[in-house]
């Protein structure tokens, strides 16, 4: 009997962990009853009682497992580590807040049985704020156009991954894993297909995404899979240097020829200085993001440090 692993990362989801486990298990036991299953939660150091709920779930059902991290390792490292700890013939990853609907799971498995070793869930629409959805669309298109690999628009990681792809993840030894980029980079070799769905609203609780986390995600994708930031630094630097040289020559000629008693004062110099300084600071920041990415990879800390595991003794 084939085994399906469902991996759910969570952080302060005390209102959602029990309902999502019940919903997923209900789908697995009714529509996917011909498969064995495991449900793995990986907790990013929750402080709201989520861990206590997970302990109760694991005590009631030995097919439910949990990994507790020693601290919050972020929105990318923790799910990546959780995927690598699953034992099924395929692994389905999904969010804890019901924005990845459990009823889509049978569609994923049906595509997997057809031979697709990666089945990516792609949002065709969303019930979230229209402005936010529009901004996300612009972001995905920008990354897709800038990236050296074919990024998947409106793909957040929700999907099914065959055990062969999970084995690849274990071999990558990547201290800064970005699953969306990895799927885009290697998906063709795993016969990737997509399943569209409408993203519902969050069931309960507040989202943990904010400007910083969204910015961090954007910078990770840009610095990991594009060269556009550094190339832009080079091109703008050359262009601004050329313009400055031409302006200097023009200014010198006008000064030497006393063209209409030319006297521009210091205003152009001050304005130009502030303008060029702004450009330099901006691109120093861009280069800093690339350097930070390199630094993180060179230090090569563990993707996740676990505090403890529950229900892994049966292996």
Image (tube, grey):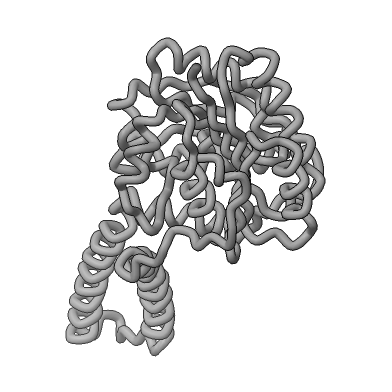
Could you say which quadrant of the image residue 5 lies in? top right
Left or right, 13 with reference to 242: right
- Residues 37 and 101: in front is 37
How far from the left and from the top, in percent, is residue 83?
Answer: 48, 41
Q: Is residue 133 above or below residue 104?
A: below
Q: Quadrant of residue 57?
A: top right
Relative to the observer, which residue lies in front, 259 or 146?
Answer: 146
| Residue closer to the observer: 12 or 292 | 12
Q: Position of residue 314 (x, y in %)?
A: 55, 40
Residue 243: x percent and y percent? 25, 68
Determine which quarter of the picture holds residue 49.
Answer: bottom right
- Residue 134 can be seen in this image: no
List x then y, in percent, for residue 130: 69, 36
Residue positioned 18% across, 79% down in the render: 253
Q: Is residue 16 visible?
A: yes
Q: Is residue 163 left or right of residue 154?
A: left
Q: Relative to residue 181, is residue 47 depicted above or below? A: below
Identify the residue at image location x=65%, y=49%.
10
Instruction: Report the residue at 35% width, 38% height from top.
Output: 167
Q: How many marks?
A: 0
Residue drawn at point x = 59 percent, y = 16 percent: 106
Q: Is residue 70 above or below residue 220?
A: below
């Amino acid at each position: 009997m084939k085994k399906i692993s469902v991996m759910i990362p969570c952080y302060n989801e005390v209102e959602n962990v029990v309902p999502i486990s019940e919903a997923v298990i209900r789908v697995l036991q009714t529509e996917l009853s011909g498969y064995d299953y495991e449900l793995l939660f990986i907790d990013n150091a929750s402080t709201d009682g989520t861990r206590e709920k997970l302990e109760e779930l694991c005590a009631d059902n030995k097919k439910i497992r949990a990994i507790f991290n020693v601290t919050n390792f972020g929105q990318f490292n923790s799910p990546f580590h959780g995927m690598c700890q699953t034992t099924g013939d395929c692994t389905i990853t999904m969010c804890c807040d019901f924005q990845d609907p459990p009823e889509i799971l049978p569609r994923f498995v049906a595509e997997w049985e057809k031979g697709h070793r990666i089945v990516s869930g792609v949002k065709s629409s969303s019930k979230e704020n229209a402005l936010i959805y529009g901004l996300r669309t612009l972001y995905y298109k920008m990354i897709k156009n800038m990236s050296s690999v074919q990024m998947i628009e409106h793909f957040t990681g929700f999907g099914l991954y065959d055990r062969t792809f999970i084995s690849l993840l274990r071999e990558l030894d990547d201290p800064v894993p970005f699953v969306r980029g990895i799927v885009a980079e290697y998906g063709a070799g795993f016969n990737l297909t997509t399943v569209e769905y409408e993203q519902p609203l969050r069931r309960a609780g507040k989202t943990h995404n904010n400007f910083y986390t969204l910015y961090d995600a954007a910078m990770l994708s840009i610095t990991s899979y594009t060269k556009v930031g550094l190339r832009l630094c080079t091109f703008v630097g050359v262009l601004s240097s050329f313009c400055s040289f031409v302006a200097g020559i023009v200014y010198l000629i006008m000064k030497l020829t006393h063209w209409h008693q030319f006297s521009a004062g210091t205003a152009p110099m001050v304005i130009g200085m502030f303008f060029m300084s702004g450009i330099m600071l901006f691109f120093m920041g861009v280069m800093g993001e690339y350097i930070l990415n390199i630094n993180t990879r060179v230090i090569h800390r563990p993707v996740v440090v676990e505090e403890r595991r529950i229900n892994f003794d049966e292996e």
